[in-house]
Amino acid sequence: MKYVKATTVLPEKLIVEIQKYIQGETIYIPKLETTYQKWGASSGSRKYIDDRNASIKYAFKKGHTIHQLAEEHFLSIETIKKIVYSK
């Protein structure tokens, strides 16, 4: 998140109106809900985790134990269970 000086992007009338409610403070203006992205969508992290989880499920179906998968992927046994038993 970057900060933008209000005087560079907002009309003076709007700044005067906002100053009736808040002055000299930082204010966050959220994005429209239609422009939200899911976590990891822009960085590729979500795809990486989805691919990793698919690989773990596949290995489990092929006979790897939960303990083996936990050690291979540096995850807890409980996390591996959540992955392999999820739909």
Image: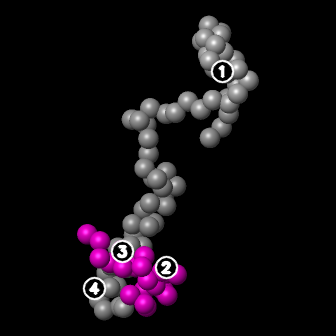
Residue at the spot 52% in from the left edge and 81% down from the top edge: 74
Check contact, mark 1 vs mark 3: CB within 8 A.
no
Q: Residue furthest front?
A: 21
Closer-to-camera residue (18/48) = 18
Q: Quadrant of the C terminus?
A: bottom left
Residue 74, relative to residue 16: is it above or below? below
Check contact, mark 2 vs mark 4: CB within 8 A.
no
Q: Which of marks 1 and 2 precedes in the sequence?
A: 1
> Residue 75, image x and y in percent?
49, 79
Q: Is residue 70 magenta?
A: yes
Residue type at the position of mark 1: Ile
The kind of secondary structure element at disc 1 is: loop
Residue type at the position of mark 4: Lys
Task: Give the residue pinned by disc 2.
Answer: 75
Q: Which of marks 3 and 4 precedes in the sequence?
A: 4
Q: Residue furthest left?
A: 87
Closer-to-camera residue (7/42) = 7
Q: Give the spatial CA distance, label 4 vs label 1.
A: 58 Å
Task: Give the residue pinned by disc 4.
Answer: 61
Q: Which of marks 1 and 4 precedes in the sequence?
A: 1
Task: Give the residue pinned by disc 3.
Answer: 82
Residue type at the position of mark 3: Lys
